[in-house]
Image: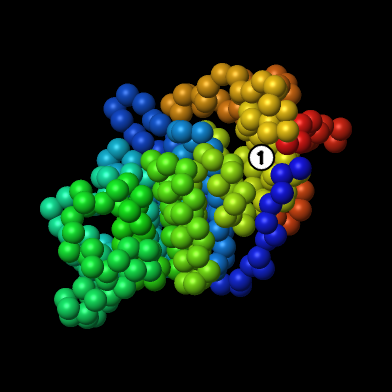
Amino acid sequence: MIEVKRESPAAEDEVLDIRDLTVQFVTEDEIVEAVNCISIHLKKGEILGLVGETGAGKTTTALAVLNLVPDPPGVIKSGSIRVCGKNMLSAAPKELEQIRGGDVSMIFQDPMTSLNPVFTVGDQIAESILLHEKCSRKEAGAKAEEMLELVGIPRERAGEYPHQFSGGMKQRVVIAIALACNPKLLLADEPTTALDVTIQAQVLDLMCGLKEKLDTSMIFITHDLGIIAEICDRVAVMYAGRIIEEGTLEEVFNHTKHPYTEGLFNSLPNIADRTAKLRPIPGLMPDPTRLPAGCAFAPRCPYAKPSCIDKPQSSRSFSATHKVLCSAYDDPSFRIHREEA
């Protein structure tokens, strides 16, 4: 059994409401089905871990929340997105400017490219504050210094440039920018991927502490199940643009239901038996321009039947919070056999 922290009580306020979201990238030759009819609901103070392989649609989902899917070629074909009750898909450009950075902010994966090399870090934090709050440049500068101290950087370094900071310190600056206006929702796109293990742990501790202090909701995008177990309240597993399993940490980690999720856990190193070989999931994710009518995971699934490839997948609820997209459960006797870590 993997030990996970107890889930904190969910707040009543819904910060994010995504319903039946579909995003495509359309070119003259083909249509890339990046996100396929997904729904996500997030309440105040919750952290949702969005996990999956590269190309599963995680970052595209986050960009869609901000209404920043590049158009063209990206098109939000259907669905609705509300952040703190505000419709992100119908809002006017001026309103979107206020929502982004005010109600919702994003921490991008690479801090090296997220910061402007010709402006000081203090000016870059102050710029976000000036855009969303009514204050003087002097007041914005003072708050920028406070934000640096909040993320563990001395305020005296506000006048320095990005090249004077290490990778971990740059990521802290990016977090300070994202949190400068106390957003209710934070989208973190693999914010620790480029960092070494020690700095990664510091950044995760920082984000957890800020979540507790500011009561910010968060979507944490990652492919690292260890990080998910450490900081998240709920988990959504994505594959080929769909959420194929969703539930609490306890449900997804210790009562795994989808064959793909089973494969993710079985491919992890077994700490209890160091002689055990890794068991990777065979094959690759399908071409997003040629997704099958049925289950996209079927060609890699050890339990797949011929009907899985042609038959649309049905969703099954195992509890009020645990849902799985898998037609194999139409057979009452079906169950997976994951070896517990």
Camera-side residue: 192 or 76? 192
Q: Where is residue 233 shown, x and y percent of the image?
A: 62, 57
Name above or below for residue 6 compared with residue 20: below
> Which residue is at 52% across, 25% downward?
285
Choose between 248 and 333: the one closer to the eye: 248
Residue 24 percent across, percent down from the top left: 40, 38
Relative to 33, residue 105 above or below: below
Q: Residue at x 26, y 45 (%)?
A: 113
Residue labelled with disc 1: 325
Q: Secondary structure at mark 1?
A: strand
Residue 100 visible in the snapshot: no
In the depicted structure, whether residue 221 falls above or below residue 45 = above
Q: Is residue 74 above or below residue 233?
A: above
Picture quarter with the C terminus: top right
| Circle 1 crowding by C-alpha within 10 Å: few under 14, some 14–19, many from 20 | many
- Specify the quadrant of the image occupied by residue 177: bottom left
Q: Residue at x 69, y 52 (%)?
A: 4
Q: Amino acid at mark 1?
A: Leu
Q: Is residue 195 left or right of residue 309?
A: left
